[in-house]
């Protein structure tokens, strides 16, 4: 059955606290440690996993956490133009979807790595990157690929359907909402199954149910989509 991508508003702000770790607790604890530490991580961190495993959520959450602390952060993903100069004021460098980088972006990423880990002044910066493949399988230039696999490497697992249901149930309960098994099955089969999209969908359902003074049912979901 074809799943619908959710495009009905701005996504909920991503944070480390809103990330349901499940089998990925080790990676979450590692990121919490280094976002709360005064000193930067001395070696890079690389997260990899299939689509929907939470890579972008975690990088966005780390970015938000560091910015909230008043720190300067460099960010690059596959949609960014190449030749972005490294900024000495950065406290950390975050690079998402590295498996999609073109040759120019790979050159920029390598430059960021070198400047972050061997700075002209001060301590090394933390480098956090994410991609869809383990370091050894990345189709990238050798010097960049070897650096991505040099430090901490975490394989992220996609949540199972029971785990997704557990997250949906927990979040709905915290909002005082009731989600029937039928509604959850509909959400999981008709919409993108990654947690970020599911939480965004729940946000909109919560608001729409409040506006219409109706319980969350399949007809209500259909009505919301028709009126969006």
Image (cartoon, rainbow, N blue to C red):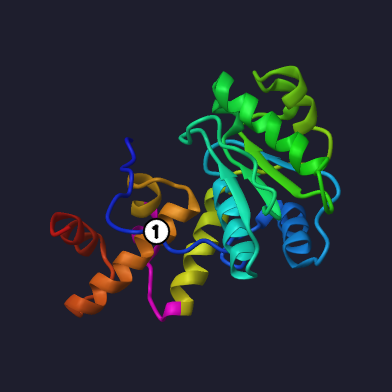
Which residue is more in the foreground, 220 or 185?
A: 220
Percent x, y for residue 97?
A: 57, 35
Viewer-closest of 34 and 11? 34
- Res 10 → quadrant: bottom left
Q: Looking at the image, can residue 16 be seen?
A: no
Q: Is residue 119 left or right of residue 73?
A: right
Tell me residue 136's x, y (percent).
75, 23
Outermost residue toward the left? 227
Residue under numbered circle 1: 11
In which image quadrant can residue 145 be found?
Answer: top right
Q: Is residue 95 visible?
A: yes
Q: Residue at x 62, y 30 (%)?
A: 108
Q: Quadrant of the N terminus?
A: top left
Compared with 96, 21 (above or below) is below
Does 88 sit above or below residue 18? above
SS assignment at label 1: loop
- Please give left or right for residue 174 compared with residue 227 in the image: right
Q: Using the image as rendered, state which of residue 96 and residue 132 is in the foreground.
A: 96
Magenta region includes residue 44: no
Residue situated furthest front in the rendering = 120
The answer to which image quadrant residue 47 occupies is top right
Which span is picked out in magenta? 175-185
- Residue 179: say if magenta: yes
Mark 1: few/some/many CA within 10 Å (<14, 14-19, 20+): some
Identify which residue is drawn at 38% across, 74% down: 178
Please name the residue shown 13% across and 59% down the image.
Answer: 227
Q: Is residue 18 left or right of residue 69?
A: left
* Callout count: 1
At horizontal 39% and vertical 58% (from top left) the residue drawn is: 11
């Amino acid at each position: 059955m074809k799943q619908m991508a959710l495009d009905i508003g701005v996504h909920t702000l991503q944070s480390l606290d809103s990330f349901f770790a499940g089998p990925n607790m080790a990676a979450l604890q590692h990121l919490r440690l280094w976002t709360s530490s005064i000193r930067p991580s001395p070696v890079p961190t690389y997260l990899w996993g299939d689509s929907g495993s939470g890579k972008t959520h975690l990088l966005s959450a780390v970015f938000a956490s560091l910015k909230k602390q008043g720190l300067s952060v460099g960010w690059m993903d596959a949609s960014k133009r190449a030749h972005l100069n490294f900024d000495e004021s950065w406290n950390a460098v975050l690079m998402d979807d590295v498996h999609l980088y073109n040759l120019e972006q790979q050159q920029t990423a390598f430059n960021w790595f070198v400047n972050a880990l061997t700075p002209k002044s001060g301590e090394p910066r933390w480098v956090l990157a994410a991609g869809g493949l383990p370091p050894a399988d990345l189709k990238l230039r050798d010097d960049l690929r070897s650096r991505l696999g040099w430090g901490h490497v975490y394989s992220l697992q996609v949540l199972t359907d029971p785990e997704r249901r557990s997250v949906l149930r927990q979040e709905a309960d915290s909002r005082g909402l009731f989600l029937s098994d039928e509604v959850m099955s509909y959400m999981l089969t008709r919409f993108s199954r990654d947690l970020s999209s599911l939480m965004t969908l729940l946000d909109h359902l919560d608001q729409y149910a409040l506006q219409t003074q109706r319980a969350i049912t399949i007809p209500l979901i259909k009505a919301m989509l028709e009126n969006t």
